Image: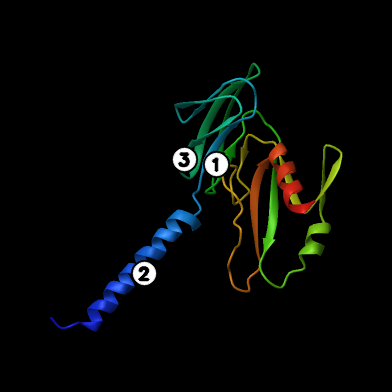
Amino acid sequence: MKKNPALIGLVITVGLILAFYGIYELFLEKKDSYLITNPTDEALKIKINEKTYTVAPQQTTPIEMDGGKHSLSFNYKGKQTDTVINVTRFNAVINPTRAEYFVFVRPYGAGRNRDSLFTSQTLTIDEKVFHGNIKRYNGIYIQDFYYNLDQKYPKFFLKKGVPTDLSKIFSKDDFKQFYFENYE
């Protein structure tokens, strides 16, 4: 049987495409998530669109949500809260305890003076000054970030020649630890 170069080329190309897709799925794809957080020491029940979720103490619970308006109902510290949230992003944190969370924006890309961007903005947390683009949130619904609590910043980000800012949400203690490990 004679070798067919076109068939061999097709098989190699299909094999490479499948290998690259597998690498993307395993290592590079960013999964979007909606999380209910409970940083307290007691279980929390929250009702979203007639479905009840129970969140264990010191845990987060991932949930499925579509874009648009959703009703939210829960009782925390004897206070009943009924509200409507509007989902417009692919990542969000539902924060019924109104705990403090921090969104840190990390600049990626070439041609940027990261030092001046970093030192020009500060935020004080527990009487300590932190440098960088950091925002504090304590609302019931937080969605102004790219990477969620259960996701990590990428080790590297390739977008040739284009400056990019990637934001991630942290709990207070996790942010302090992240900042200490990366910037002190």
Q: Of 36 and 26, which appears nearest the observer?
A: 26
Residue type pointed to by label 2: Leu
Which quadrant of the figure has residue 107?
A: bottom right
Q: Where 68 falls versus 110 (above or below)?
A: above
* Residue located farthest toward the left when viewing the structure as drawn: 1
Secondary structure under badge 3?
Answer: loop
Crowd around label 2: few <14 · some 14–19 · many ≥20 (10 Å): few
Residue at image location 49% in from the left, 49% down from the top: 31
Q: Nearer the viewer, residue 172 or 65?
A: 172
Q: Nearer the viewer, mark 2 or mark 3?
A: 2
Q: Residue at x 71, y 73 (%)?
A: 111
Disc on the earlier residue, 2 or 1: 2
Q: Where's residue 128, x and y in %? A: 85, 42
Q: Nearer the viewer, mark 2 or mark 1?
A: 2
Could you tell me residue 147's position as x and y percent? 59, 49
Marks counted in the figure total 3
Q: Residues within 10 Å of mark 1 (few under 14, many from 20)?
A: few
- Residue 115 image offset from top left, x and y in percent: 80, 63
Give the colour scheme of this rendering: rainbow
The part of the image, by quadrant, that contains residue 72 is top right
Identify which residue, 98 or 80, lies in the foreground: 98
Helix, strand or loop status at disc 1: strand
Query: What residue sits right under mark 1 in the picture?
Result: 86
In the rendered image, residue 54, in percent from the top left (x then y), is placed at: 51, 24
Q: Are marks 3 and 1 in contact (CB under 8 Å)?
A: no
**Structural distance between the alpha carbons of marks 2 and 3:** 35 Å
* Residue lying furthest top: 78
Give the alpha-carbon distance from disc 3 to disc 1, as whole Å. 11 Å
Q: With respect to residue 27, does 148 lie above or below?
A: above
- The residue that disc 3 covers is 65
| Residue type, label 3 | Met
